[in-house]
Amino acid sequence: MAKKPLNAKNLAALGADRLAALLLEITKGNASAKRRLRLELAGEDGPAQAAVEIRKRLTTLAGSQAFIDWQGRNAFAADLDGQRRAIVEQVGRKDPKIAWDLIWQFVALANGIYERCDDSTGRVQGVFHTACEDLIDLAESAAPDPVELADRLAEALSDDDYGHYPALISGLAPTLGPSGLRHLKSRISAPGVDGPDIYVLRHALEQIADAEGDVDGYIAQHNSRARKVPQIAAQIAHRLLKAGRVDEAWAAINAADPGGGDRDEYDWEETRIGILNAMGRQDEAQSFRWQCFTQSLSLDHLRAYLKQLPDFEDVEAEERAMRHVIGFPDVHMALQFLILWNSLDHAAKLVRARAGAIDGDYYELLSPAADALDARDPLAATLLRRAMIDFTLQAARSKRYRHAARHLQECKNLADRIASFAPHIDHATYVNHLRRDHLRKSAFWDKVGGK
C-alpha cells in the first residue's frame, strides 16, 4: 500500500480529536510549541486575549538574564519570531492599535537580548529587523497621533544601543507628517541633548532632514572632518545634485580625501562621474571612469566606460583594458577580474606568466578559477591547483589535505591534455617532488592513495 504524503488534507482526515491528542503528545516537553498552542487558543477568544499571552511572554523575555549560546540560538530565534508573527497575524489583522503597542514592546527587547545572545549568524537580529518593518506597516492601519509617535520615537532613540530606531524614521515619515517630524526634531535638538556627538541621534536627524527634503539640515550633521570621508562626501554631493545644486555638489565631492579603494570609495567615484555628466563634462567623466578602473579593476567602471564608446572602438579599448589587468600589481585581483569578466584566455595567460606570484591560500578564488580554465587551458588550471597543493602541504593545513588530494587527482586527469608543460615540470616530476619534500605527511598521502 502506497504511503500517504504528509499534507494538510491527509492530516485533516484524521479528525479533530485525533489531531488534538497528537498535538498534546508531540508538544510534551516542548515549551516553545506549547506557547504557540496557547497563543492559538487565546486568539480564538479575540485579539485582546492573544495580546495578554504575548505580553506575558515579552515581559518574561525582558526580565530574563539567561545567556543564549550558539546551540540554543536557532530555537530561541524561532520562538522570538513566533511572538512577532502572532503580533502581526493574530492581533494586527483584528486590532492594529493593540498590535501597534505590542510591536513597540517587542522591538524594545533588542538591546537586552543582543547583550545575552551569541548571534554570530545574525539570525536573531534578522527577527528584529523584520519587526521594524512590521512596525512601519502597522503604523498605516493603527494611525497613531503624529506628535505622540514623535514622543515615542524620541524616548526610544535615547535608549537605542544598536541603531534600530533611526532607520524607522524614513518609513514612519508619512505617519509623522510635517508636524510629527518637526516635533521629533525639536525633541532631539532640545538643550542638553548633544545630538551631533551621538551616532543614533545624529543619524535620526539625518533621516528627518531627508524626510523633509532639507539638504542643508542633512549636511549640518557632519563636521568638516567627516565631509572629507569619501562615503559621506558622496552622500552629501548626491543630495545636492538631486536638489539641482550642481556647483555645490562638485565642491562637496572634491572635498573628500579618497585613497582607500573600498566600496565606499566606489560610491564616491560614481557620484563624481554623475556630477561631471550633469555639468556637461562627459569627456572628463569618461577619463575618470578609465582612471578608476585602472586603479581598482572595477568591472562596473569598465563596463560603463566601454558602453560610452562608439562601435568598434570598444573592442580595442577592451583589449587595452585586458593588457592592463594582466600587468596589474595584485595578481589575485587581476585573476578575479578576468574570471568575472569571463575573459578566460587572458586569465590563462596571466596564470602561465605569473604562476610564481600566486598564493595558494586564496582557495576561494583559485579553485573556481581552475574549474573555469579546465577546458580552455589545462596547464593554467593545473598551475592554480599546484599552488593550492603546495600551500596546503608547506603550511601543514591538515584540514585541507582531502582537497589537496582531490586537486592532485584533477592535475593527473588533465596531464594527458597538456602538450607541453614548459617551462614548468610535468605531472610525474611534480608528484615526485611532492613525495621528496612532504613524504612524512602520511595523512595527505593516505588520501592520495594511488593517485
Image (cartoon, rainbow, N blue to C red):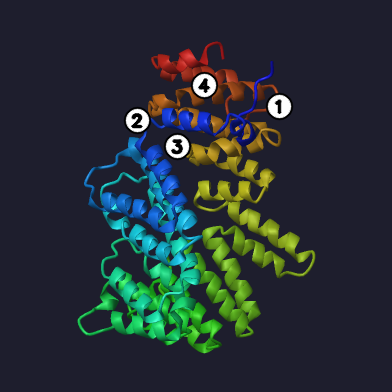
Q: Foreground: 213 or 379? A: 213
Q: Where, quadrant-wise, is the C terminus in this rendering?
A: top right
User: What whole-number distance in Å separates the C-alpha atoms at marks 4 and 1?
Assistant: 24 Å
Residue at which label 4 appears:
405
Q: Give the mark nearest the N terminus, 3 or 4.
A: 3
Q: Which quadrant would residue 411 be assigned to in this image?
A: top right
Give the mark toward the camera: 3 or 2.
2
* Left or right relative to 295: residue 105: left
Q: Where, quadrant-wise, is the N terminus in this rendering?
A: top right
At horizontal 54% and vertical 83% (from top left) the residue drawn is: 241
Q: Which mark is residue 419?
A: 1
The three-letter amino acid code for the residue at tag 1 is Ala
Would you place residue 123 above or below residue 31 in this image? below
Q: Give the mark nearest the N terminus, 4 or 1.
A: 4
Element type at marker 4?
helix
Element type at marker 2?
loop
User: What whole-number distance in Å separates the C-alpha atoms at marks 3 and 4?
Assistant: 15 Å
Residue at which label 3 appears:
361
Residues packed near mark 4 inside 10 Å, few (<14), some (14 to 19) or many (20 plus):
some
Give the mark toward the camera: 4 or 1.
4
- Percent x, y of residue 196: 29, 77
- Percent x, y of residue 388: 49, 32
Residue 254 appears in view: no
Would you place residue 344 above or below residue 170 in this image? above
